[in-house]
Amino acid sequence: MQIEDRVFIVTGASSGIGRSTAIALSARGAKVALLARSTETLRQLAPKLPGSLPLTVDMTQFERVREAVAAVRQHYGRVDGLVNNAGRSYAAAIEEIDPALFDEIFHLNVLGPIVAMQAVIPVMRAQGGGSIVNINSGTAFMTIPQYSVYSASKRALLGFSLTARAELEKDRIVVSEIYPFITATNFGKNRMGNPAGGGPAATYASGDKPEFVAGLVLQAIEEGQAQYFANDRLRKMAGGAP
């Protein structure tokens, strides 16, 4: 799908991969709806992206997600693409898992993207097609102590994404996934649960640039393959050819 003159929704657009993706889309001539919890950060970003629309949205508040998608359609008259980027990590040993935090992670990492997809699918179908890109994680293919909740949420997103891709093919709605490696964002600092459980935040500071991952997102939109990996190691772990 072409990017220029199309309308995209980017969740978690206030920082990291989401922010870089929104900037990259805008630079290619797209109109971008910026969804995130941080109202002030979005207000600072929006003027830098011509024609963008900032919307304060907590992706665990499902009715607000639906309202936001409706507002984007009303504002632009269409929705061509959705980038489900918002997410959060959680570190805890199995015996230390807090059920309430477990529930919050699954609402944000799994149900939030599903609700957003449900909201845009009828719009895209009526338009004759669209692009949905879900930001996943290499942990979906790993067994990492302290990370069972997060990796489980990403495995669930993997299953839903592949199923949605098959279901929506007839409607010309393409569902793709991005698998970043360690990326230099606030991901580690924003981790829930045991602060020391997932390793030092410095690990993330030395990772790939978020702009690199944003490039994979744009590639997915234009090419429409099922999965895009940050490196060959992740591709091999997923069972793909090197």
Image (cartoon, rainbow, N blue to C red):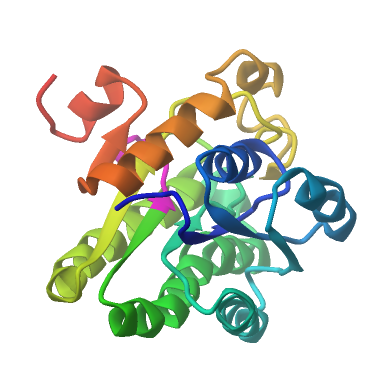
Asked where in the image residue 169 lies, by quadrant, the reply is bottom left
Q: Which residue occupies the extreme top position in the image? A: 206
User: Viewer-proximal residue, 145 or 118?
Assistant: 118
User: Viewer-proximal residue, 98 or 199?
Assistant: 199
Residue 196 versus residue 107 in the image, above or below? above
**Number of numbered discs overlaid on the protein picture:** 0
User: Viewer-proximal residue, 155 or 25?
Assistant: 25
45 sits left or right of 193 in the view: right
In the rendered image, is residue 152 in sight? Answer: no
Look at 43% across and 62% down and name the residue there.
Answer: 81
Measured as percent of width and height from the top left, residue 104 is found at 63, 66
Measured as percent of width and height from the top left, residue 33 is found at 63, 62
In the rendered image, is residue 57 in sight? Answer: yes
Residue 205 included in the magenta stretch of the image: no
Look at 30% across and 45% down and name the residue there.
Answer: 222
Residue 142 included in the magenta stretch of the image: yes
Residue 197 versus residue 121 in the image, above or below? above
Q: Give the range drawn in magenta.
A: 134-143
Residue 39 versus residue 193 in the image, above or below? below
Measured as percent of width and height from the top left, residue 76 is found at 58, 74
Measured as percent of width and height from the top left, residue 154 is found at 41, 51
Asked where in the image residue 16 lies, by quadrant, the reply is top right
Look at 23% across and 49% down and name the residue there.
Answer: 224
Look at 74% across and 35% down and name the residue there.
Answer: 195
148 sits left or right of 128 in the view: right
Q: Look at the image and tell me in which quarter the C terminus lies.
A: top left
